[in-house]
Image (cartoon, grey):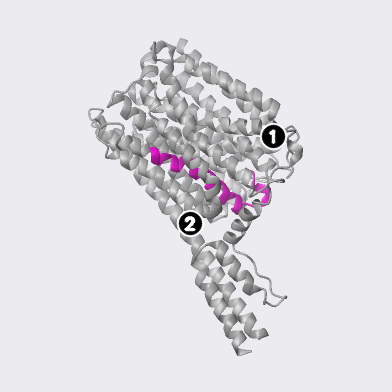
């Protein structure tokens, strides 16, 4: 009997030693030992064990990874996935399409140079502010209906963006760009909602689809800037065709959605209601807050209306959270989110990461056009490295998720964003593209391609079943809104450093270092979450091993 107990204890010790290794190995060792536990005791798996168990079980879902009644054929399913990918591509293309030609647009409108930041910021500002509302509309009134509404808005306002050429009003153009973002706010959350509804949780097909949706970010950013540069190669006055062509593509994708997005997706199965008060207060607060940060560098922080709007926006944002937590009947942000520290940490990390990318994006184009004097087509075309690196990374994400914790992938992604700003901050203006610039473009897709699937999976694990559809909406809100807000912060720093516009390089570097600071904060938050999950799993596994040993001793 003693020999048997000693053998059991040795097995337990070996199992405990393996805790620091892969989850799959530790699962096997603890399961073998736990067979001797008294039947009255129940072992509760850790969150990490649940996640990897879900991923492993997904390998057996090749037949049932999606509910078969949604698609009549493989072609039907592939067409649906194509529409999902195009939604993310158009989002990023819409963000960068005016960047490679921003000097041409500014000259055509007679705009001040300081106003160029709005050519970038207005689109993600509005899309980020409305995404949660667009997602809730989809949950209540139908995901497909709101998706089609989003494409209709995007198509109409893309045409109007081109027509502003005849108004000679840069303010009208900026407003039209903002309404383009409104269309995207109804597209992105409902795409993710459809994928989440149609495919089984944890299935390989769902993970790969989400991964390739993320991969469309670098592809869309490349096409947006490159196509705009091509349009103006022969004549700068052709720039409106950038937006007319964008409208045509948006319309065609919308038509494809009409025919290939399934009609029988369940609608409002959780009996949700629209939170009108919370939506209005939250959206207005977010719009005003980012508006102040992007407008103040142009008009100055000493202007009375800037201070008044800043105070109002802060009051509205605070009021939004108070109302959502204490008074809303069906809150836009349920307590499962506002009361979950881990969810808040993940959202903050994503906010910081994509905020640094927003800074990098605007100042990459400014640096290339104003200091290196690249042509618009070469400035946009230089993004080709995004495609090479992006698709390589995206093709691996679906498999990496099986063997690496999402929290680790998230840290890597935020690091990729931050390194892009750090490398650019020390890049000489006269250096060849093929050194620092090419290198950072290979690193940045780490952030773009890894952050979306990693954060979506983590949030999906953290949220209860009735709020699964919110994971994508929350991530997209952070992705889009952060680019507008953080750009405003960086522009404020740049204007204070660039000697009233006489030292552009000094100002641009100050903006890049601002991005490095924001990104470092994001890395710290993501790392804290990662180490906390490691520590929690270690403690739970240690407790499990001790419980097994105690049970064996009692039954021995």
Q: Which residues are magenta?
A: 442-469
Q: Nearer the viewer, residue 271 or 158?
A: 158
Q: Is residue 39 magenta?
A: no
Count every numbered label the image shows and give the total.
2
Q: Vertical placement of 551 versus 336: above or below? A: below
Q: Quadrant of the C terminus?
A: bottom right
Magenta segment main secondary structure: helix
Question: Which residue does the numbered mark 2 point to in the structure image?
Answer: 529
Q: Residue 36, located in which quarter of the rendered image?
A: bottom right
Q: Give neighbour class at mark 1: few <14, some 14-19, many 20+ (Cα, 10 Å).
A: few
Q: Position of residue 163 (x, y in %)?
A: 50, 13
Q: In the figure, is residue 168 to the left or right of 324?
A: left
Q: Position of residue 373 (x, y in %)?
A: 29, 23
Q: In the figure, is residue 393 to the left or right of 154?
A: left
Q: Nearer the viewer, residue 152 or 50?
A: 50
* Residue sitting at x 45%, y 57%: 528
Q: Give neighbour class at mark 2: few <14, some 14-19, many 20+ (Cα, 10 Å).
A: many
* Residue sitting at x 29%, y 36%: 435
Q: What kind of element bears circle 2?
A: helix
Q: Residue 144, located in which quarter of the rendered image?
A: top right
Q: Earlier in the sequence, mark 1 or mark 2?
A: 1
Q: Position of residue 105 (x, y in %)?
A: 40, 18
Q: Quadrant of the N terminus?
A: bottom right
Q: Nearer the viewer, residue 439 or 336?
A: 439
In this rendering, which labeled residue sits more in front, label 1 or label 2? 1
Decide: marks 1, 2 in contact (CB < 8 A)?
A: no
Camera sees residue 508: yes
Q: What kind of element bears circle 1?
A: helix
Q: In the figure, is residue 500 to the left or right of 124?
A: left
Question: Which residue does the numbered mark 1 point to in the structure image?
Answer: 74
Q: Label 1, label 2: how many angstroms apart (C-alpha)?
A: 40 Å
Q: Position of residue 111 (x, y in %)?
A: 36, 18
């Amino acid at each position: 009997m003693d020999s048997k107990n000693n053998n059991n204890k040795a097995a337990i010790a070996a199992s405990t030693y393996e805790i620091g290794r892969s989850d799959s190995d530790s699962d096997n060792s603890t399961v073998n030992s736990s067979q001797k536990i008294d039947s009255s005791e129940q072992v509760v798996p850790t969150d990490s064990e649940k996640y990897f168990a879900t991923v492993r079980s997904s390998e057996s879902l090749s037949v049932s990874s999606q509910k078969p009644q949604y698609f009549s054929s493989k072609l039907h399913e592939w067409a649906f996935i194509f529409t999902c990918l195009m939604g993310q591509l158009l989002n990023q293309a819409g963000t960068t399409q005016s960047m490679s030609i921003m000097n041409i647009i500014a000259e055509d409108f007679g705009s001040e140079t300081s106003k160029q930041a709005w050519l970038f910021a207005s689109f993600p500002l509005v899309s980020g502010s409305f995404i949660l509302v667009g997602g809730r509309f989809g949950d209540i009134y139908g995901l497909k209906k709101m998706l089609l509404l989003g494409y209709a808005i995007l198509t109409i306002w893309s045409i109007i963006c081109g027509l502003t050429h005849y108004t000679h009003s840069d303010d009208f153009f900026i407003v039209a760009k903002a309404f383009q973002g409104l269309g995207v706010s109804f597209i992105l959350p409902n795409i993710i909602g459809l994928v989440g509804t149609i495919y089984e949780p944890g299935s390989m097909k769902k993970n790969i689809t989400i991964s390739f949706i993320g991969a469309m970010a670098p592809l869309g950013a490349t096409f947006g800037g490159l196509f705009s540069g091509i349009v103006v190669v022969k004549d700068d006055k052709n720039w409106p065709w950038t937006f007319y062509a964008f409208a045509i593509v948006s319309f065609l994708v919308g038509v494809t959605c009409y025919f290939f997005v399934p009609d029988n997706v369940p609608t409002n199965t959780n009996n949700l209601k629209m939170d009108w008060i919370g939506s209005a207060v939250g959206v207005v607060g977010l719009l005003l807050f980012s508006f102040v940060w992007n407008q103040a560098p142009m008009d100055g922080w000493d202007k009375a209306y800037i201070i008044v709007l800043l105070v109002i926006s802060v009051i509205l944002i605070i009021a939004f959270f108070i109302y959502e937590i204490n008074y809303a009947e069906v809150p836009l942000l349920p307590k499962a989110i506002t009361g979950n520290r881990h969810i808040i940490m993940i959202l903050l990390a994503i906010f910081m990461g994509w905020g640094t990318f927003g800074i990098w994006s605007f100042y990459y184009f400014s640096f290339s056009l104003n200091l290196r004097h690249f042509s618009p087509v070469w400035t946009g075309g230089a993004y080709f490295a995004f495609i090479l690196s992006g698709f390589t990374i995206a093709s691996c994400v679906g498999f990496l998720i099986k063997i690496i914790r999402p929290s680790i992938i998230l840290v890597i992604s935020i690091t990729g964003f931050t390194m892009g700003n750090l490398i650019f901050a020390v890049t000489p203006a006269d250096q060849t593209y093929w050194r620092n610039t090419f290198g950072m473009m290979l690193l940045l897709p780490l952030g773009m391609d890894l952050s979306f699937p990693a954060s979506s999976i983590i949030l999906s694990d953290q949220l209860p079943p009735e709020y699964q559809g919110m994971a994508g909406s929350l991530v997209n809100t952070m992705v889009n809104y952060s680019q507008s807000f953080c750009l405003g912060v960086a522009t404020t720093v740049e204007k204070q450093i660039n000697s009233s516009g006489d030292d552009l390089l000094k100002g641009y570097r100050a903006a890049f270092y601002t991005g490095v600071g924001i990104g470092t904060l994001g890395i710290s938050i993501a790392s804290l979450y990662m180490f906390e999950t490691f520590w929690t799993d270690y403690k739970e596994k240690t407790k499990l091993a001790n419980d097994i040993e105690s049970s064996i001793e009692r039954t021995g």
